[in-house]
Image (cartoon, coloured by chain):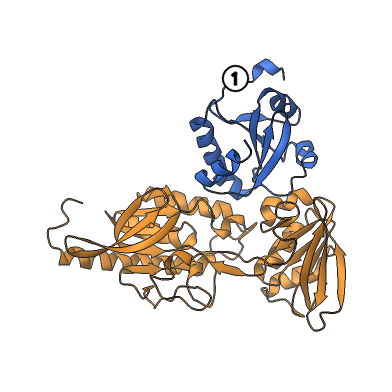
Chain colours: A blue, B orange
Amino acid sequence: MAEETFVENPDYPIELNDDTLDEAVRKYPFLVVDCWAEWCGPCKMLGPIVENLAKKHQGDIVFGKIDVDKNNKTASRYGIRSIPNLLVFKDGAKAGDIVGAMPEDRLLQRINAFK
Amino acid sequence: MYDIIIVGSGPGGLTAGIYASRSRMKTLMLTSQVNPSLITTTDIVENFPGFPGGITGYELIERFTQQARLFGLEIVEDDVVSLERASRDSTDIWRVNTGKGSFEALSVILATGTEYAHLNVPGEVEYTGKGVSYCATCDGPFYRDVPVAVVGGGDTAVQEALFLTRFASRVTIIHRRDRLRAARILQERAVAHEKIDFAWNSAVEEILGETMVKAVRISDVGDPSEKRTLEVEGVFVFTGYIPNTVFVRDVVECDESGYVIVDDKMKTSAPGIFACGDCTKKVLRQVITACGDGATAAFAAEQHAQDLKGNAYGAWAGF
Protein backbone atom coordinates (compact mmCIF):
# COMPACT_ATOMS: atom_id res chain seq x y z
CA MET A 1 0.00 0.00 0.00
CA ALA A 2 1.32 3.41 -0.89
CA GLU A 3 1.78 6.11 1.70
CA GLU A 4 -0.76 8.48 0.19
CA THR A 5 -3.59 6.06 0.87
CA PHE A 6 -3.42 6.92 4.58
CA VAL A 7 -5.58 9.95 5.34
CA GLU A 8 -4.04 12.88 7.15
CA ASN A 9 -6.23 13.06 10.23
CA PRO A 10 -8.47 9.99 10.44
CA ASP A 11 -11.41 10.07 12.88
CA TYR A 12 -11.56 6.24 12.95
CA PRO A 13 -8.99 3.49 13.58
CA ILE A 14 -7.29 2.82 10.26
CA GLU A 15 -7.11 -0.80 9.15
CA LEU A 16 -3.50 -2.04 9.14
CA ASN A 17 -1.71 -5.30 8.32
CA ASP A 18 1.78 -6.84 8.43
CA ASP A 19 2.74 -4.97 5.26
CA THR A 20 1.31 -1.53 6.01
CA LEU A 21 2.15 -1.12 9.69
CA ASP A 22 5.66 0.27 9.10
CA GLU A 23 4.34 2.79 6.61
CA ALA A 24 1.81 4.05 9.15
CA VAL A 25 4.42 4.19 11.93
CA ARG A 26 6.61 6.36 9.70
CA LYS A 27 3.76 8.63 8.66
CA TYR A 28 2.10 9.39 11.98
CA PRO A 29 4.23 10.86 14.80
CA PHE A 30 1.88 9.45 17.45
CA LEU A 31 0.13 6.22 16.54
CA VAL A 32 -1.80 3.80 18.76
CA VAL A 33 -2.49 0.39 17.21
CA ASP A 34 -5.24 -1.83 18.63
CA CYS A 35 -4.12 -5.45 18.25
CA TRP A 36 -7.22 -7.64 18.31
CA ALA A 37 -8.65 -10.93 17.05
CA GLU A 38 -12.07 -12.33 16.33
CA TRP A 39 -11.77 -14.98 19.04
CA CYS A 40 -11.13 -12.47 21.85
CA GLY A 41 -14.15 -11.29 23.88
CA PRO A 42 -12.43 -8.43 25.75
CA CYS A 43 -11.16 -7.10 22.38
CA LYS A 44 -14.76 -6.64 21.33
CA MET A 45 -15.32 -4.52 24.42
CA LEU A 46 -12.28 -2.38 23.74
CA GLY A 47 -13.01 -1.91 20.01
CA PRO A 48 -15.85 0.63 20.42
CA ILE A 49 -13.84 2.52 23.07
CA VAL A 50 -10.94 2.89 20.63
CA GLU A 51 -13.35 4.04 17.90
CA ASN A 52 -14.74 6.66 20.28
CA LEU A 53 -11.29 7.96 21.19
CA ALA A 54 -10.33 8.14 17.52
CA LYS A 55 -13.35 10.35 16.88
CA LYS A 56 -12.88 12.56 19.95
CA HIS A 57 -9.14 13.04 19.54
CA GLN A 58 -8.97 13.42 15.78
CA GLY A 59 -5.90 15.43 14.87
CA ASP A 60 -4.27 14.65 18.21
CA ILE A 61 -3.94 10.86 18.35
CA VAL A 62 -4.04 8.58 15.31
CA PHE A 63 -5.47 5.11 15.95
CA GLY A 64 -4.97 1.98 13.91
CA LYS A 65 -6.15 -1.58 14.30
CA ILE A 66 -4.65 -4.85 13.24
CA ASP A 67 -6.11 -8.35 13.30
CA VAL A 68 -3.19 -10.28 14.80
CA ASP A 69 -4.78 -13.61 13.87
CA LYS A 70 -4.28 -12.77 10.19
CA ASN A 71 -1.05 -10.84 10.79
CA ASN A 72 1.26 -13.19 12.68
CA LYS A 73 4.41 -11.29 11.79
CA THR A 74 3.32 -8.23 13.73
CA ALA A 75 2.32 -10.38 16.70
CA SER A 76 5.69 -12.12 16.91
CA ARG A 77 7.73 -9.03 16.05
CA TYR A 78 6.28 -7.12 19.01
CA GLY A 79 6.13 -10.14 21.32
CA ILE A 80 2.36 -9.98 21.71
CA ARG A 81 1.18 -12.68 24.05
CA SER A 82 -2.07 -11.13 25.29
CA ILE A 83 -4.82 -9.23 23.59
CA PRO A 84 -6.35 -6.70 23.58
CA ASN A 85 -2.98 -5.00 23.32
CA LEU A 86 -2.43 -1.41 22.20
CA LEU A 87 0.98 -0.74 20.68
CA VAL A 88 2.03 2.88 21.09
CA PHE A 89 4.42 4.33 18.49
CA LYS A 90 6.06 7.69 18.91
CA ASP A 91 8.24 9.38 16.30
CA GLY A 92 8.59 6.20 14.29
CA ALA A 93 9.48 3.80 17.11
CA LYS A 94 7.62 1.69 19.62
CA ALA A 95 7.22 3.62 22.85
CA GLY A 96 5.35 0.95 24.79
CA ASP A 97 2.19 -1.09 25.02
CA ILE A 98 -1.03 -1.19 27.00
CA VAL A 99 -2.42 -4.64 27.76
CA GLY A 100 -6.03 -5.47 28.63
CA ALA A 101 -9.46 -3.85 28.41
CA MET A 102 -10.16 -0.74 30.50
CA PRO A 103 -12.60 2.17 30.59
CA GLU A 104 -12.20 5.04 28.14
CA ASP A 105 -10.87 7.65 30.59
CA ARG A 106 -8.23 5.30 32.02
CA LEU A 107 -7.17 4.21 28.56
CA LEU A 108 -6.78 7.82 27.49
CA GLN A 109 -4.64 8.52 30.55
CA ARG A 110 -2.39 5.58 29.75
CA ILE A 111 -2.07 6.70 26.12
CA ASN A 112 -1.31 10.31 27.05
CA ALA A 113 1.43 9.14 29.43
CA PHE A 114 3.46 8.15 26.34
CA LYS A 115 3.24 11.60 24.76
CA MET B 1 -35.98 7.44 37.90
CA TYR B 2 -35.97 3.72 37.15
CA ASP B 3 -38.01 0.95 38.71
CA ILE B 4 -34.99 -1.32 38.69
CA ILE B 5 -31.27 -0.83 38.06
CA ILE B 6 -29.22 -3.94 37.39
CA VAL B 7 -25.48 -3.66 37.99
CA GLY B 8 -23.61 -6.16 35.83
CA SER B 9 -24.25 -7.88 32.51
CA GLY B 10 -23.46 -11.56 32.95
CA PRO B 11 -25.96 -14.42 32.87
CA GLY B 12 -27.55 -13.42 36.22
CA GLY B 13 -27.94 -9.74 35.37
CA LEU B 14 -29.20 -10.37 31.85
CA THR B 15 -31.77 -12.92 33.03
CA ALA B 16 -32.97 -10.37 35.59
CA GLY B 17 -33.06 -7.87 32.71
CA ILE B 18 -35.18 -10.19 30.56
CA TYR B 19 -37.66 -10.79 33.39
CA ALA B 20 -37.86 -7.19 34.60
CA SER B 21 -38.25 -5.69 31.10
CA ARG B 22 -40.83 -8.28 30.16
CA SER B 23 -42.78 -7.24 33.28
CA ARG B 24 -42.74 -3.72 31.86
CA MET B 25 -40.58 -2.45 34.68
CA LYS B 26 -38.53 0.57 33.64
CA THR B 27 -35.16 -1.12 33.84
CA LEU B 28 -31.59 0.06 33.33
CA MET B 29 -28.55 -2.19 33.13
CA LEU B 30 -25.12 -0.75 33.92
CA THR B 31 -22.34 -2.82 32.39
CA SER B 32 -18.70 -2.66 33.39
CA GLN B 33 -16.04 -1.60 30.94
CA VAL B 34 -13.38 -3.11 33.16
CA ASN B 35 -14.70 -6.50 34.17
CA PRO B 36 -16.43 -8.39 31.39
CA SER B 37 -18.57 -11.31 32.50
CA LEU B 38 -16.15 -14.18 33.05
CA ILE B 39 -18.32 -16.44 30.92
CA THR B 40 -17.40 -14.34 27.86
CA THR B 41 -13.84 -15.54 28.24
CA THR B 42 -14.90 -19.19 28.43
CA ASP B 43 -14.17 -21.28 25.39
CA ILE B 44 -17.20 -23.53 25.54
CA VAL B 45 -20.19 -23.98 27.80
CA GLU B 46 -21.47 -27.52 27.41
CA ASN B 47 -23.71 -27.89 30.46
CA PHE B 48 -26.23 -25.13 29.69
CA PRO B 49 -29.48 -26.89 28.78
CA GLY B 50 -30.71 -26.41 25.24
CA PHE B 51 -27.29 -26.39 23.57
CA PRO B 52 -26.38 -30.06 23.06
CA GLY B 53 -23.32 -29.16 20.97
CA GLY B 54 -22.16 -26.56 23.49
CA ILE B 55 -21.94 -22.83 22.87
CA THR B 56 -19.14 -20.33 23.39
CA GLY B 57 -19.51 -18.11 26.44
CA TYR B 58 -19.34 -15.02 24.27
CA GLU B 59 -22.14 -16.16 21.97
CA LEU B 60 -24.31 -17.17 24.92
CA ILE B 61 -24.02 -13.66 26.38
CA GLU B 62 -24.74 -12.11 22.98
CA ARG B 63 -27.95 -14.13 22.80
CA PHE B 64 -28.97 -13.17 26.34
CA THR B 65 -28.35 -9.51 25.52
CA GLN B 66 -30.32 -9.68 22.30
CA GLN B 67 -33.24 -11.30 24.11
CA ALA B 68 -33.21 -8.68 26.90
CA ARG B 69 -33.11 -5.82 24.38
CA LEU B 70 -36.14 -7.26 22.59
CA PHE B 71 -38.15 -6.59 25.76
CA GLY B 72 -36.82 -3.04 26.00
CA LEU B 73 -33.94 -3.32 28.45
CA GLU B 74 -31.85 -0.14 28.41
CA ILE B 75 -28.12 -0.82 28.64
CA VAL B 76 -25.47 1.77 29.53
CA GLU B 77 -21.72 1.10 29.73
CA ASP B 78 -20.54 2.68 32.93
CA ASP B 79 -18.68 1.41 35.98
CA VAL B 80 -20.47 1.77 39.30
CA VAL B 81 -18.49 3.50 42.04
CA SER B 82 -20.96 3.59 44.92
CA LEU B 83 -24.54 3.07 46.06
CA GLU B 84 -26.31 5.43 48.44
CA ARG B 85 -29.68 5.89 50.06
CA ALA B 86 -31.71 8.85 48.80
CA SER B 87 -35.24 10.09 49.20
CA ARG B 88 -37.82 11.14 46.63
CA ASP B 89 -41.27 12.36 47.70
CA SER B 90 -40.65 10.78 51.10
CA THR B 91 -39.95 7.39 49.51
CA ASP B 92 -36.63 5.69 50.13
CA ILE B 93 -34.81 5.02 46.89
CA TRP B 94 -31.25 4.14 45.83
CA ARG B 95 -28.82 6.34 43.98
CA VAL B 96 -26.25 4.49 41.89
CA ASN B 97 -23.15 6.58 41.25
CA THR B 98 -20.90 5.90 38.29
CA GLY B 99 -17.82 7.62 36.99
CA LYS B 100 -19.94 9.79 34.70
CA GLY B 101 -23.06 10.52 36.71
CA SER B 102 -25.75 8.97 38.84
CA PHE B 103 -28.96 7.05 38.32
CA GLU B 104 -31.88 6.52 40.69
CA ALA B 105 -34.09 3.49 41.19
CA LEU B 106 -36.61 1.97 43.55
CA SER B 107 -34.82 -1.39 43.46
CA VAL B 108 -31.24 -2.37 42.66
CA ILE B 109 -30.03 -5.80 41.59
CA LEU B 110 -26.34 -6.52 42.08
CA ALA B 111 -25.06 -8.96 39.45
CA THR B 112 -21.41 -7.96 39.48
CA GLY B 113 -19.87 -11.41 39.32
CA THR B 114 -16.28 -12.21 40.15
CA GLU B 115 -12.85 -11.74 38.67
CA TYR B 116 -9.89 -14.10 38.60
CA ALA B 117 -7.72 -14.17 41.67
CA HIS B 118 -4.04 -13.45 41.23
CA LEU B 119 -1.19 -15.64 42.44
CA ASN B 120 0.63 -12.77 44.16
CA VAL B 121 4.08 -14.16 43.40
CA PRO B 122 7.15 -12.36 42.04
CA GLY B 123 7.04 -11.97 38.26
CA GLU B 124 3.26 -12.16 37.97
CA VAL B 125 2.56 -8.46 37.49
CA GLU B 126 5.78 -7.87 35.58
CA TYR B 127 4.99 -10.53 32.96
CA THR B 128 1.26 -9.98 32.62
CA GLY B 129 0.72 -9.81 28.87
CA LYS B 130 4.25 -11.15 28.40
CA GLY B 131 3.45 -14.76 29.19
CA VAL B 132 1.17 -14.49 32.23
CA SER B 133 -2.49 -14.70 31.24
CA TYR B 134 -5.93 -14.99 32.79
CA CYS B 135 -7.76 -15.66 29.52
CA ALA B 136 -6.94 -18.81 27.55
CA THR B 137 -9.45 -18.04 24.81
CA CYS B 138 -7.90 -14.60 24.27
CA ASP B 139 -4.29 -15.57 24.40
CA GLY B 140 -4.05 -19.32 23.69
CA PRO B 141 -3.41 -18.91 19.95
CA PHE B 142 -0.19 -16.96 20.70
CA TYR B 143 1.32 -20.10 22.23
CA ARG B 144 1.54 -22.33 19.17
CA ASP B 145 4.04 -25.19 19.62
CA VAL B 146 5.46 -23.95 22.91
CA PRO B 147 5.04 -25.42 26.42
CA VAL B 148 2.69 -23.68 28.87
CA ALA B 149 1.51 -24.14 32.45
CA VAL B 150 -1.98 -23.83 33.87
CA VAL B 151 -2.27 -23.07 37.58
CA GLY B 152 -5.33 -24.45 39.38
CA GLY B 153 -7.40 -27.62 39.62
CA GLY B 154 -11.02 -26.52 39.30
CA ASP B 155 -13.40 -26.59 36.35
CA THR B 156 -12.01 -23.46 34.72
CA ALA B 157 -8.37 -24.53 35.05
CA VAL B 158 -8.98 -27.95 33.54
CA GLN B 159 -11.30 -26.74 30.79
CA GLU B 160 -8.84 -24.04 29.75
CA ALA B 161 -5.95 -26.55 29.89
CA LEU B 162 -7.89 -28.72 27.44
CA PHE B 163 -8.46 -25.71 25.20
CA LEU B 164 -4.77 -24.82 25.27
CA THR B 165 -3.80 -28.29 23.95
CA ARG B 166 -4.99 -27.07 20.54
CA PHE B 167 -2.03 -24.72 20.39
CA ALA B 168 0.65 -25.53 22.95
CA SER B 169 3.15 -28.35 22.60
CA ARG B 170 2.64 -29.37 26.24
CA VAL B 171 0.31 -28.19 29.00
CA THR B 172 1.35 -28.77 32.61
CA ILE B 173 -1.38 -28.37 35.22
CA ILE B 174 0.12 -27.10 38.47
CA HIS B 175 -2.15 -27.87 41.40
CA ARG B 176 -1.75 -27.56 45.16
CA ARG B 177 -3.43 -30.89 45.84
CA ASP B 178 -2.98 -34.47 44.66
CA ARG B 179 -6.21 -34.59 42.67
CA LEU B 180 -8.39 -32.29 40.64
CA ARG B 181 -11.53 -30.58 41.88
CA ALA B 182 -13.00 -30.21 38.37
CA ALA B 183 -16.09 -32.07 37.13
CA ARG B 184 -15.31 -35.75 36.55
CA ILE B 185 -15.77 -35.59 32.76
CA LEU B 186 -13.13 -32.84 32.55
CA GLN B 187 -10.77 -34.80 34.80
CA GLU B 188 -11.12 -37.86 32.57
CA ARG B 189 -10.36 -35.86 29.45
CA ALA B 190 -7.35 -34.15 31.02
CA VAL B 191 -5.82 -37.34 32.39
CA ALA B 192 -6.30 -39.09 29.05
CA HIS B 193 -4.83 -36.21 27.02
CA GLU B 194 -1.36 -36.92 25.65
CA LYS B 195 -0.33 -33.24 25.77
CA ILE B 196 -1.36 -32.71 29.42
CA ASP B 197 0.81 -33.59 32.39
CA PHE B 198 0.52 -32.68 36.06
CA ALA B 199 2.62 -31.10 38.79
CA TRP B 200 0.72 -32.33 41.86
CA ASN B 201 1.05 -30.86 45.37
CA SER B 202 2.83 -27.91 43.89
CA ALA B 203 2.69 -24.17 44.46
CA VAL B 204 4.05 -21.48 42.17
CA GLU B 205 6.86 -19.53 43.85
CA GLU B 206 8.03 -17.28 41.07
CA ILE B 207 7.55 -16.60 37.39
CA LEU B 208 10.87 -16.21 35.63
CA GLY B 209 11.88 -14.59 32.38
CA GLU B 210 13.74 -11.85 30.62
CA THR B 211 11.48 -9.74 28.43
CA MET B 212 9.05 -12.67 28.19
CA VAL B 213 8.24 -15.58 30.48
CA LYS B 214 10.78 -18.40 30.25
CA ALA B 215 9.97 -20.60 33.21
CA VAL B 216 8.05 -21.03 36.41
CA ARG B 217 9.56 -22.12 39.72
CA ILE B 218 7.37 -24.39 41.83
CA SER B 219 7.79 -25.92 45.25
CA ASP B 220 6.30 -28.94 46.95
CA VAL B 221 3.38 -27.97 49.20
CA GLY B 222 4.43 -30.55 51.85
CA ASP B 223 8.13 -29.69 51.71
CA PRO B 224 8.72 -26.16 50.33
CA SER B 225 12.49 -26.72 50.25
CA GLU B 226 11.91 -29.11 47.38
CA LYS B 227 11.81 -26.90 44.32
CA ARG B 228 11.94 -27.37 40.58
CA THR B 229 11.73 -25.21 37.51
CA LEU B 230 9.43 -25.88 34.58
CA GLU B 231 10.42 -24.34 31.28
CA VAL B 232 7.27 -22.75 29.89
CA GLU B 233 6.52 -19.69 27.81
CA GLY B 234 3.04 -19.16 29.18
CA VAL B 235 1.50 -19.30 32.66
CA PHE B 236 -2.31 -19.31 32.71
CA VAL B 237 -3.72 -18.54 36.15
CA PHE B 238 -7.09 -20.02 37.19
CA THR B 239 -6.75 -20.45 40.92
CA GLY B 240 -9.93 -18.88 42.18
CA TYR B 241 -12.16 -15.87 42.18
CA ILE B 242 -12.69 -12.55 43.95
CA PRO B 243 -16.23 -11.12 44.05
CA ASN B 244 -16.61 -7.68 42.45
CA THR B 245 -18.30 -6.27 45.54
CA VAL B 246 -15.79 -3.78 46.96
CA PHE B 247 -18.11 -0.81 46.28
CA VAL B 248 -21.06 -2.32 48.21
CA ARG B 249 -19.36 -3.88 51.21
CA ASP B 250 -20.45 -1.01 53.47
CA VAL B 251 -24.01 -1.10 52.12
CA VAL B 252 -24.95 -4.78 52.15
CA GLU B 253 -23.81 -7.61 54.38
CA CYS B 254 -21.08 -9.78 52.85
CA ASP B 255 -19.28 -12.89 54.07
CA GLU B 256 -15.58 -12.89 54.99
CA SER B 257 -14.57 -13.38 51.33
CA GLY B 258 -16.76 -10.52 50.15
CA TYR B 259 -19.64 -12.53 48.67
CA VAL B 260 -23.03 -10.82 49.14
CA ILE B 261 -25.32 -12.63 51.58
CA VAL B 262 -28.83 -13.13 50.20
CA ASP B 263 -31.96 -14.96 51.31
CA ASP B 264 -34.13 -17.22 49.15
CA LYS B 265 -35.73 -14.16 47.52
CA MET B 266 -32.26 -12.82 46.64
CA LYS B 267 -32.74 -10.02 49.16
CA THR B 268 -29.63 -8.54 50.72
CA SER B 269 -29.43 -6.95 54.17
CA ALA B 270 -30.35 -3.55 52.65
CA PRO B 271 -34.04 -3.00 51.77
CA GLY B 272 -34.47 -2.63 48.00
CA ILE B 273 -31.11 -4.15 47.11
CA PHE B 274 -31.10 -7.65 45.67
CA ALA B 275 -28.21 -9.72 44.35
CA CYS B 276 -27.81 -12.68 42.00
CA GLY B 277 -25.20 -14.85 40.35
CA ASP B 278 -21.54 -15.38 41.16
CA CYS B 279 -21.19 -12.33 43.44
CA THR B 280 -23.49 -13.96 46.02
CA LYS B 281 -22.66 -16.47 48.73
CA LYS B 282 -23.84 -19.81 47.31
CA VAL B 283 -22.72 -23.39 46.76
CA LEU B 284 -22.58 -23.59 42.96
CA ARG B 285 -21.47 -20.75 40.67
CA GLN B 286 -22.60 -21.68 37.17
CA VAL B 287 -24.46 -19.99 34.31
CA ILE B 288 -27.61 -21.96 35.05
CA THR B 289 -27.67 -21.07 38.76
CA ALA B 290 -26.95 -17.41 38.00
CA CYS B 291 -29.93 -17.39 35.61
CA GLY B 292 -32.18 -18.91 38.26
CA ASP B 293 -31.04 -16.31 40.80
CA GLY B 294 -31.56 -13.55 38.23
CA ALA B 295 -35.18 -14.50 37.61
CA THR B 296 -35.89 -14.60 41.35
CA ALA B 297 -34.10 -11.30 41.94
CA ALA B 298 -36.14 -9.60 39.20
CA PHE B 299 -39.36 -10.95 40.69
CA ALA B 300 -38.48 -9.73 44.19
CA ALA B 301 -37.15 -6.38 42.93
CA GLU B 302 -40.38 -5.80 41.04
CA GLN B 303 -42.42 -6.59 44.13
CA HIS B 304 -40.38 -4.08 46.13
CA ALA B 305 -40.80 -1.38 43.46
CA GLN B 306 -44.55 -1.97 43.25
CA ASP B 307 -44.85 -1.78 47.04
CA LEU B 308 -43.08 1.58 47.05
CA LYS B 309 -45.25 2.88 44.23
CA GLY B 310 -48.33 1.78 46.15
CA ASN B 311 -47.11 3.56 49.27
CA ALA B 312 -46.43 6.73 47.35
CA TYR B 313 -49.87 6.81 45.79
CA GLY B 314 -50.05 9.21 42.85
CA ALA B 315 -46.66 10.67 43.48
CA TRP B 316 -44.96 8.84 40.60
CA ALA B 317 -46.89 10.32 37.70
CA GLY B 318 -43.91 12.47 36.81
CA PHE B 319 -41.59 9.53 36.37
In the rendered image, the vertical position of residue B233 relative to residue A10, given as above or below? below
Residue B203 shows in the view: yes
Residue B40 at x, y percent in the picture: 58, 55
Query: In the image, what residue occupies the spot 36% across and 58% down?
Result: B96
| Residue furthest bottom as drawn | B222
Residue count near mark 1 (Cα–Cα under 10 Å), binned few <14, some 14–19, many ≥20: few
Measured as percent of width and height from the top left, residue B126 is found at 72, 56
Q: Residue at x 36, y 49 (%)?
A: B101
Q: In the rendered view, does B216 fall on the left or right side of A8?
A: right
Q: Is residue B23 visible?
A: no
Horizontal side, residue B172 vs residue B69: left or right: right
- Lateral position of residue B31 relative to residue B163, left or right: left
Counting from the top left corner in percent of width and height, residue B18 is at 39, 57
Where is mark 1, residue-wise? A8
In the image, is residue B282 above or below residue A20? below
Along the viewing direction, whichever of B24 and A94 lies nearer the viewer: A94
Q: Residue at x 74, y 77 (%)?
A: B176
Residue A68, image quadrant? top right
Looking at the rendering, which quadrant does residue B276 occupy? bottom left
Residue at 61 percent across and 63 percent down: it is B46
